[in-house]
Image (tube, grey):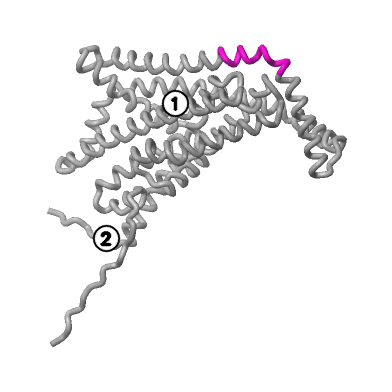
């Protein structure tokens, strides 16, 4: 019988860091392959309760249950996209009004810059003309890259659907694979990890949906109060884009400002939109996120921000979206392995009020 090898702290730390670096390198190198797989895994976990109900309770065959789950999920997504496209088409009828109000808004900006920064309108127009010429030169290249990116998104969407289907029907197969990797005496820990991962991801995605609905309602209500015409559409777009950390709300604000030009070009409307976005973000960041999101995944703000930044640098918007659930999975694993439990505590949000070092009492010599 072999004795377990006890390593010093610095050796354990080196092994952990090397392992994390290897995982990060593999993810950055193969992000185009791994990102759809991870997205499909999240969607499969979300659909797993429905799949289990159809397969075990209703006694529908495994493949048919997976297809029904995917059809329901896709119907929900397609319904939202149809509603948005219908509203955007309806908004296009006000294009002439938008163009007129945009010109008036630009004139007001020119006057504001001239009065406060002493830059003449002629100099401003010359600068804009030079910027426009540079934009036209690179316009064709940007259009080509945009078309390629759209085709990549469509291809990734199809792959994610296929992967989600396969995750559902091969669920037990993957469980058996993990059971074969782990020793039998550690199977209770493995079962606990898998159970907690399922609960954590389900809670996280459901919390995101609740947050999206609340932000959409609050934004739509605020825009309705200040008199924005397409407040329902803009509230929904803000709620969806709010799922993208940091940059999502900025994009939503720009879209809302542009859409407000269907009614008026007054600066008071623009100011009202900014106030509505600031209030909604204050409520979201200080009430919704701590109560709905952080209470479910139990990841502290420092680790969350770092994870989102690293995920965005590694895989763009998809990496930012995947950062929190991946961190939650890592924390669940760390908490249940004794040698890694300090790292799980570091990622958690249970901050002690105070900490005092315990001093060892030295017995007095006789």
Query: Is label 2 in a helix, a strand or a loop?
Result: loop
Q: Tags 1 and 2 in contact by the CB under 8 Å rule?
A: no
Horizontal side of residue 364 vs 212, given as left or right? left
Q: Position of residue 169 (x, y in %)?
A: 29, 21
Q: Position of residue 338 (x, y in %)?
A: 24, 52
Q: Position of residue 71 (x, y in %)?
A: 38, 14
Given the current orientation, which residue lies at the most extreme front position? Answer: 225
Q: Position of residue 157 (x, y in %)?
A: 47, 22
- What secondary structure prevails in the magenta region? helix
Q: Nearer the viewer, residue 195 or 158?
A: 195
Q: Which mark is residue 213?
A: 1
Choose top left, top right, bottom left or bottom right for residue 211: top left
- The magenta segment is 86-97
Q: Residues within 10 Å of mark 2 (few under 14, many from 20)?
A: few
Choose top left, top right, bottom left or bottom right for residue 91: top right
Q: Nearer the viewer, residue 98 or 177?
A: 98
Q: Nearer the viewer, residue 62 or 1?
A: 62
Asked if the magenta segment contains residue 89, the reply would be yes
Query: Is residue 280 shown to the viewer in this render?
Result: yes
Residue 147 vs 364, above or below: the answer is above
Residue 33 vs 94, above or below: the answer is below
Mark 2, residue position:
7
Q: Nearer the viewer, residue 101 or 330?
A: 101
């Amino acid at each position: 019988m072999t004795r377990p090898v006890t390593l010093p702290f610095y050796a354990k730390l080196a092994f952990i860091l090397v392992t994390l670096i290897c995982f990060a390198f593999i993810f950055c190198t193969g992000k185009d392959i791994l990102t759809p797989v991870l997205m499909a895994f999240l969607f499969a976990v979300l659909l797993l309760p429905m799949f289990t109900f159809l397969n075990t309770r209703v006694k529908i065959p495994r493949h048919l249950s997976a297809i029904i789950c995917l059809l329901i999920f896709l119907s929900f997504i397609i319904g939202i996209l149809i509603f948005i496209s219908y509203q955007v088409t309806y908004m296009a009828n006000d294009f002439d009004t938008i163009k007129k109000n945009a010109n008036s808004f630009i004139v007001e900006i020119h006057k504001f810059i001239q009065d406060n920064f002493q830059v003449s309108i002629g100099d401003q127009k010359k600068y804009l003309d030079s910027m426009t010429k540079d934009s036209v030169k690179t316009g064709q290249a940007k259009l080509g890259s945009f078309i390629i990116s759209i085709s990549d998104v469509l291809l990734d969407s199809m792959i994610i659907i296929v992967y989600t289907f396969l995750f559902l029907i091969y669920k037990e197969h993957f469980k058996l694979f993990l059971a074969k990797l782990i020793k039998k005496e550690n199977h209770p820990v493995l079962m606990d990890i898998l159970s907690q991962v399922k609960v954590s991801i389900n809670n996280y995605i459901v919390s995101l949906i609740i947050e999206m609905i609340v932000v959409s309602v609050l934004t739509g209500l605020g825009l309705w109060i200040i008199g924005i015409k397409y407040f329902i559409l803009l509230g929904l777009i803000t709620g969806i884009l709010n799922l993208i950390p940091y940059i999502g709300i900025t994009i939503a604000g720009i879209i809302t400002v542009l859409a407000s030009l269907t009614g008026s070009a007054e600066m008071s409307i623009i100011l009202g939109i900014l106030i509505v976005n600031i209030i909604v973000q204050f409520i979201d960041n200080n009430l919704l996120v701590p109560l709905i999101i952080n209470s479910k995944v139990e990841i502290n703000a420092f680790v969350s921000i770092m994870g989102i930044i690293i995920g965005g640098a590694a895989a763009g918007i998809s990496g930012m979206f995947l950062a929190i659930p991946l961190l939650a999975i890592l924390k669940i694993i760390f908490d249940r392995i004794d040698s890694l439990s300090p790292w799980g505590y570091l990622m958690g949000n249970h901050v002690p009020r105070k900490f005092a070092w315990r001093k060892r009492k030295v017995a007095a010599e006789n």
